[in-house]
Image (tube, helix red, strand yellow):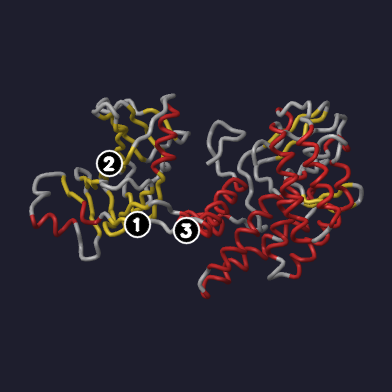
């Protein structure tokens, strides 16, 4: 979840798609994950009689499922230093929870422990200090939503990321190793699903796939659930709750195209339909809730669809990459890509200040000075143009990339990064 523009976390489609594409790439290029099942390391404990043979038989049914009542718990010992923890869980009441214990080994001997409590809460926020568990030097609550799942959910926890978030709450730093996992009822746990892994790129990729399919709206987009106000000079541009983004649509197309190539035959229609639907917003004008605007009479796909438009360069090129990826399966996507590529060729010179690239073209419509890109965005522009040249063979794109790379080698812009963050942040 993102806190880029709001204190209360929210789902930001652009970051979710980037997260999924990152795991896709790692799954393709990284080492095969080391997997260690944990079914034999489960200890059932709880109320009277819980350790009897009869209670054990009731707890672990023939399908490897343990059912816990409110006064019972299951403890899993974690003997492997493998950072990814996976399991299937069904919570039945709001007081169901699971606790991950991590331990920090000290070179001089001894150890200190951290408790990460994953529980349901109606409180706004994702992570906060837990004041109840005084036995642990560091005890942090992770909010898993206001309602019990009442259905099986496959969970993937990167203990390194979770520990880093906990340490950030306590403003400290250290390396902690996973040692124990405790489930408290009422809940059900699939014992044979419990395992530790060195990585979970495939699992993370498919989690994003499921999120995408479930969150696409009737217009084919993934609306952003917060409003944005962009203030520039004497102008105030407002993006209402539910605004769409061409960058999100482009990343979604790149993601769905890859999901389609990996999917089983029976699943491919889902991804193809979602991708075809995602094209719709590229043909809907901004004033009607789409992402299509124009600059100097040429079509432009807006990352931030304000009126008037801002013409963010990196978001436009991400949209083109997605259209190019899906063009392999769709003539409509190919036509949209070619229209956008023509606009890029004709308008790219407007982003060249003569010493640095511009982040956007807001100054064309607003009473403001040109908005120079931050160093990170300038280098991103160079990388994107080089990739665009590799798929089009257009020498003008390569020449521009080389010239802009030369700017980066010989000088840095006198620019306040705050201006990019006011509209885009770190996409």
| Element type where label 1 sits in the image | strand
Q: Say which label, 3 or 2, has the lower sequence index.
A: 2
Q: Position of residue 223 (x, y in %)?
A: 64, 48
Mark 2 nearby-residue class (10 Å; few <14, some 14–19, many ≥20): some
Mark toward the viewer: 1 or 3: 1
Mark 1 nearby-residue class (10 Å; few <14, some 14–19, many ≥20): some
Q: Position of residue 58 (x, y in %)?
A: 16, 58
Q: Which residue is mark 3?
A: 202
Horizontally, is 30 left or right of 299 in the view?
left
| Residue lying at the far right of the rendered structure | 296
What separation in Å lies between label 1 and label 3 (alpha carbons)? 13 Å
Mark 3 nearby-residue class (10 Å; few <14, some 14–19, many ≥20): some
At 55% across and 49% down in the image, what residue appears? 19
What separation in Å lies between label 2 and label 1 (alpha carbons)? 16 Å
Horizontally, is 166 left or right of 66 in the view?
right
Q: Which residue is mark 2?
A: 179
- What numbered label is drawn on residue 35? 1
Horizontally, is 104 left or right of 375 in the view?
left
At 19% across and 58% down in the image, what residue appears? 60
At 44% across and 40% down in the image, what residue appears? 161
| Residue lying at the far bottom of the rendered structure | 265
Depth order, front residue of 365/35: 35
At 74% across and 39% down in the image, what residue appears? 378
Q: Say which label, 2 or 1, has the lower sequence index.
A: 1
| Element type where label 3 sits in the image | helix
Horizontally, is 401 left or right of 279 in the view?
right
Q: Position of residue 292 (x, y in %)?
A: 79, 52
Q: Position of residue 390 (x, y in %)?
A: 75, 58
Depth order, front residue of 360/238: 360
Q: Say which label, 1 or 3, has the lower sequence index.
A: 1
């Amino acid at each position: 979840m993102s806190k880029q523009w709001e204190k209360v976390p929210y789902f930001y489609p652009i970051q979710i798609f980037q997260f999924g594409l990152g795991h896709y790439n790692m799954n393709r290029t990284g080492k095969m994950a080391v997997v260690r099942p944990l079914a034999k390391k489960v200890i059932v404990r709880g109320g009277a009689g819980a350790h009897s043979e009869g209670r054990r038989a009731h707890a672990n049914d023939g399908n490897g499922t343990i059912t816990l009542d409110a006064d019972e718990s299951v403890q899993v010992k974690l003997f492997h230093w493998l950072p990814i923890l996976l399991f299937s869980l069904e919570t039945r009441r709001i007081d169901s929870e699971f606790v991950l214990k991590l331990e920090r080994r000290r070179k001089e001997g001894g150890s200190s422990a951290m408790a990460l409590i994953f529980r349901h809460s109606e409180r706004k926020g994702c992570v906060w200090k837990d004041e109840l568990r005084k036995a642990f030097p560091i005890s942090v609550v992770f909010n898993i939503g206001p309602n019990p799942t009442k259905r099986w959910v496959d969970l993937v926890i990167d203990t390194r990321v979770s520990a880093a978030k906990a340490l950030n709450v306590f403003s400290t730093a250290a390396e902690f190793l996973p040692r124990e996992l405790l489930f408290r009822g009422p809940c059900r746990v699939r014992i044979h699903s419990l395992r530790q892994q060195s990585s979970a790129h495939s699992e993370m990729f498919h989690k994003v796939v499921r999120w995408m399919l479930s969150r696409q709206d009737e217009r084919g987009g993934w609306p952003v659930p917060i409003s944005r106000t962009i203030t520039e000079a004497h102008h105030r541009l407002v993006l209402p709750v539910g605004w769409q983004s061409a960058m999100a649509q482009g990343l979604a197309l790149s993601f769905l195209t890859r999901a389609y190539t990996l999917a089983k035959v029976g699943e491919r229609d889902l991804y193809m339909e979602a991708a075809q639907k995602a094209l719709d917003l590229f043909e809907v004008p901004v004033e009607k809730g789409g992402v299509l605007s124009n600059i100097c009479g040429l079509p432009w796909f807006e990352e931030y669809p304000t009126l008037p438009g801002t013409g963010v360069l990196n978001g436009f090129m991400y949209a083109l990459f997605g259209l190019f990826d899906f063009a392999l399966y769709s003539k409509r996507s190919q036509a949209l890509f070619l229209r956008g590529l023509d606009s890029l060729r004709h308008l790219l010179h407007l982003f060249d200040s003569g010493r640095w690239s511009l982040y956007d073209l807001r100054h064309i419509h607003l009473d403001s000075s040109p908005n120079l890109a931050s160093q990170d965005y300038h280098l991103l522009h160079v990388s994107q143009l080089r990739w665009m040249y590799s798929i089009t063979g257009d020498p003008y794109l390569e020449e521009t990339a080389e010239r802009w790379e030369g700017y980066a080698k010989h000088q840095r812009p006198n620019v306040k990064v705050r201006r990019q963050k006011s509209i885009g942040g770190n996409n």
